Image (cartoon, grey):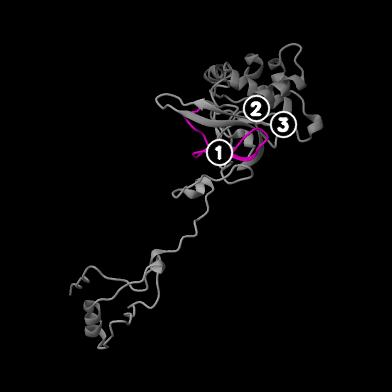
Amino acid sequence: MLGLLLGRAAPPLARQAQTLLAQPTAQTACLASLATGRPCRLPLQLGGPWPSFRSSRPAERSLPPAMSGLLPAGLNRGDACAIGQAGSARHFSTRNLRGRLFYKRRPKMVPTWKFNQRSKWLEGAGNRKGVCTKVFVANARKPNSGLRKVCYVRLSNGRVVKAYIPGIGHNLQVHSVVMVRGGRHADVIGCNYTCMRGQYDLLPVKNRKKARSKYGVTRPNIEPKRKRFQSLTTAVDRRLHFYRTGDEIGSDEAIPKRVAYTVRNNAPITYRHSKPKKKSK
C-alpha cells in the first residue's frame, strides 16, 4: 500500500511516512480525505505539507491511481466517509454514568421545591378546617408523664390526622368543627398537628393572662391603675414645684404634670445619661 503511494520517494522519506501511517488516527484522516475530497494535511517533517488530492469540480472527485490501494477490498467511498465522520464525532470522557447525582443535576439558580414533611396533609395551606372523629387522651412519652388531650380530625381534603388540643380544659367532642394548623408535639406519638383555640367550636382557654394569642384569648378590658387611683400631693411636692416654676399651689390643688400627656411606649423627651465626648483638637 505504501509502495503505490511512495514508490518514487526517497528511502528516509518513505520510512517516516510509513511510521506515521501506521497510527490509526492518520489512517482515518486519510480515508476521510479520500471520501470527502477535502485536503488531508498531517504534520509531517517531510519538507512540505501532505499532498492533497482534490479536483476542481465535486462530480469529478475520484481516488488517484496511487491511492487506490489504500482502500481495502469491499470498502467503497460511502463507507470511508462514514468512518471519517465517526472518528471526528467521537470524544473521550472519564465521567461515570452510574455515579451519584449524574441524572439529578439541575441549574443552580432553579429553586428546589421544599415543604414540611410533618404537616404535608395540609397540602400547602397554613391551616385547614376539619371535623373531629374521635377525642381521647394519650400517655406522654418518656421522660414526661401525664395525659395529653388529642383527637382525630377529618380535614376538608379528606385526610384524617392526629391533632393535639393545647391548653387546660377543652369542650371538643365527636362532630365538633375545629381549625387545624401544623405543629408537632414531641411527647405525643404521631401527633404533628395542633388545634387552634378560639376557632369554630373550640373555645379559648379560661383565665389565661400570658401568651394569650396562642390560646385564642382576647385582651381583657381592664382599667389601668393610673385611672383607678387618685395621686396625692404633699407639701414637699408643692415646694419643689414652687422652686421650679415660682407658682404657689394650694393644698387641694393638683400639681400639673411636667409632661402634658401620658406616653406608653415612646417618651417625648430623651435623657442623656452620659456626658458628651470632647472633640480632640
**Magenta segment range?**
165-188
Residue marked by disc 1? 170
Residue marked by disc 2? 89
Nearer to us: label 1 or label 3: 1
Magenta span contains residue 47: no
* Residue 49 image point, x, y percent: 58, 31
Quadrant in the rendering for residue 190 = top right
Q: Mainly helix, strand or loop, the magenta region?
A: loop
Mark 1 or 3 closer to N-term? 3
Residue marked by disc 3? 54
Badge 1: few (under 14), some or many (20 or more) residues near its Cα, within 10 Å? some
Observer-nearest residue: 106 or 279? 279
Observer-nearest residue: 281 or 157? 157
Observer-nearest residue: 63 or 207? 207
Can residue 125 be seen here? The reply is no
Quadrant in the rendering for residue 231 = bottom left
Above-or-below relation of 177 to 10:
below
Mark 3 or 2 closer to N-term? 3
